[in-house]
Amino acid sequence: MAKTCKPETGKKLFRESDPRDVATFPRPEEHCLVFVRHGEPAFPESDKYYLGKTDWLLSDKGKIQARCVADWAKGFSWRGCFCSPLKRAKETAEIICGAIDLPFTIKTELAEIDLGEWDGRKKTEIASAYPEKLRERQEDLLYFRHPCGESFAELEARVIPFLVPLLQEKGKWLVVSHAGVYRVLIHALFGVPFPMTFGYDLGYGQIRMFCRTGDYLFVKGFDELMVHLEELK
């Protein structure tokens, strides 16, 4: 069975590597999938937003973050790269793959969750307009369907059939995608209760390594996140 931990909801379990310092990024194993969260988007204002399929480009800071990942990736040989069709992920992949001369393939399965009527709107605005819906969301984060959008469970249903076979391929792979996609992957693979996956969150332009050794898949740096490959079938 998969080993799991119980972090506090919303609490980070680790110190993020500094995206400006390539030396803080770990070395990939022989067989691994490196999940890259896209760089910082160009938000229209400094407020916090619900960001799903709203299609914003990278900010200047986001482009720097992508270049830092590219500098790190130059040191290794890659079999391929897949990315979300959304502009912030595609632009991140273009920067990384352009630097290492690696083609990338766009996969719609890797797009961020569709937040429907909430997508691209300020969190303060949604809190005022949808107080009851927000309470429903907090009570059942995995299965709550955003108005005219998706639930995280529906996101998981389209992400996992693509990523699980890729996790079992040989060699090193890059996947450029989104926080929501990463969270449902952690939930599905390792049985971490969904609200607690936020404790493993990735910052913009950060990476996480899903590695294989022997009969096990694990997340590098997290001993508690491990599963036998037979459980993925």
Image (spheres, rainbow, N blue to C red):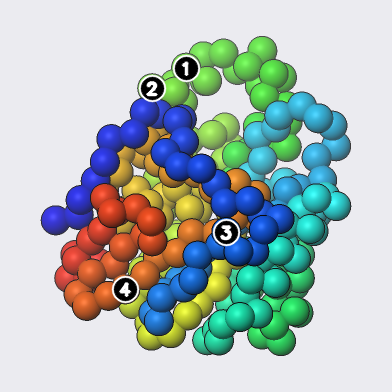
The type of residue carrying mark 3 is: Thr
- The residue carrying mark 1 is 135
Q: Earlier in the sequence, mark 1 or mark 4?
A: 1
Please identify the quarter of the rendering in which residue 32 is found.
bottom left
Q: Residue, x 31% and y 63% (percent of image)?
A: 218
- The residue carrying mark 2 is 139
User: Does 220 appear above or below 112?
Assistant: below
Q: Earlier in the sequence, mark 4 or mark 2?
A: 2
Q: Tags 3 and 2 in contact by the CB under 8 Å rule? A: no
Helix, strand or loop at label 4? It is strand
The type of residue carrying mark 2 is: Glu
Q: CA distance from mark 3 to mark 1?
A: 39 Å
User: Does 65 appear above or below 183?
Assistant: below
Q: Which of label 4 and label 2 is nearer to you? A: 4
Residue 227 percent across, percent down from the top left = 23, 61
Q: Residue, x 54% and y 34% (percent of image)?
A: 146
- The residue carrying mark 3 is 24
Q: CA distance from mark 1 to mark 4?
A: 39 Å
Residue 66 percent across, percent down from the top left = 72, 62
Q: Residue, x 20% and y 51% (percent of image)?
A: 3
Q: Residue, x 48% and y 53% (percent of image)?
A: 182
Q: Tags 3 and 1 in contact by the CB under 8 Å rule? A: no
Which of the pair 69/15 is nearer the observer?
15
Helix, strand or loop at label 3? It is helix
Q: Earlier in the sequence, mark 3 or mark 2?
A: 3
Residue 121 percent across, percent down from the top left = 73, 31
Give left or right: position of 67 versus 79. Answer: right
